[in-house]
Amino acid sequence: ASLRRRERILAKLMQQLYPALYQWWHGFYYYKERIQKPQKLIYQAKKFRNWLKEHTMPTQVICPECGSTECRLFSGVKNGVNYRCGFCNLVFSLIADTRFRKTEKVDELLPVFKMLMAGYCDTDISRERGILSGSVTTPMMWRQKMLAQIRDLNLDLLADWIEWRHYTRFRAHMQQDK
């Protein structure tokens, strides 16, 4: 909090004493917040978000064996990612053939994706989602699986964007810690 206050005071002084320098600095300093996303990136992000919703929060589940819609959540599994067909009793998962097949808490994937798009790093995600304090392993694994799945779906621009945002945020954290 005191660092932000100091930045605001310095910014006001710079604006009063050196307006040209302030214009340059302000544009550079706040550039990362005002980045305009290209239309193709917005399209790919929407496509992946819809894919995630279909595989983690489906509106209708269809049995892959018999095609029945009489499917219920299978209670023997965490987070309701497995279903049992009411017609043929097949137990199946919608994420079995994806990079998320052994992922717990699949309901966290959509919020994590939104945070990755916003440029959050693994530490921020861990803190925001209430994951064990100091543990960045889970968000890091989610990010890696998500990037692999995005690349599998041929959404390379989206994967590059997330990696770039992660790298810039990580680098900012490293500079803060110095």
Image (spheres, grey):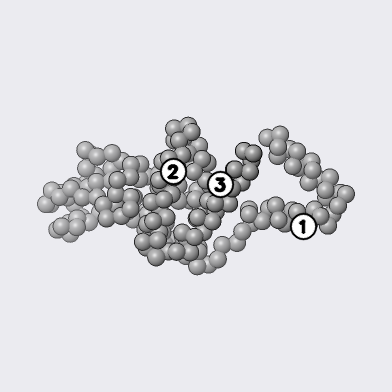
Q: Residues within 10 Å of mark 3 (few under 14, many from 20)?
A: some
Name the residue type under label 1. Answer: Trp
Q: Secondary structure at mark 1?
A: helix
Q: Quadrant of the N terminus?
A: top right
Q: Residue furthest right?
A: 17
- Residue pointed to by mark 3: 170
Q: Secondary structure at mark 2?
A: helix
Q: Quadrant of the C terminus?
A: top right
Could you say where residue 103 lies in the image, as x and y percent from the top left? 33, 45
Could you say where residue 168 lies in the image, as x and y percent from the top left? 58, 51
- Residue pointed to by mark 1: 24
Mark 1 and mark 3: span between their CA atoms?
24 Å
Name the residue type under label 3. Answer: Phe
Say which residue appears at 88% left-offset and 49% top-offset.
17
Q: Residue furthest front?
A: 178
In this rendering, the answer to whether 8 lies above or below 116 is above
- Disc nearest the viewer among 2 and 3: 3
Q: Quadrant of residue 31?
A: bottom right
- Residue pointed to by mark 2: 139
Q: Residue 118, can we see it?
A: no
Sequence order check, earlier mark of 1 and 3: 1
Sequence order check, earlier mark of 1 and 2: 1
Picture disc at residue 48? none
Q: Residue furthest top?
A: 133
Say which residue appears at 83% left-offset and 50% top-offset.
15
Q: Residues within 10 Å of mark 1 (few under 14, many from 20)?
A: few
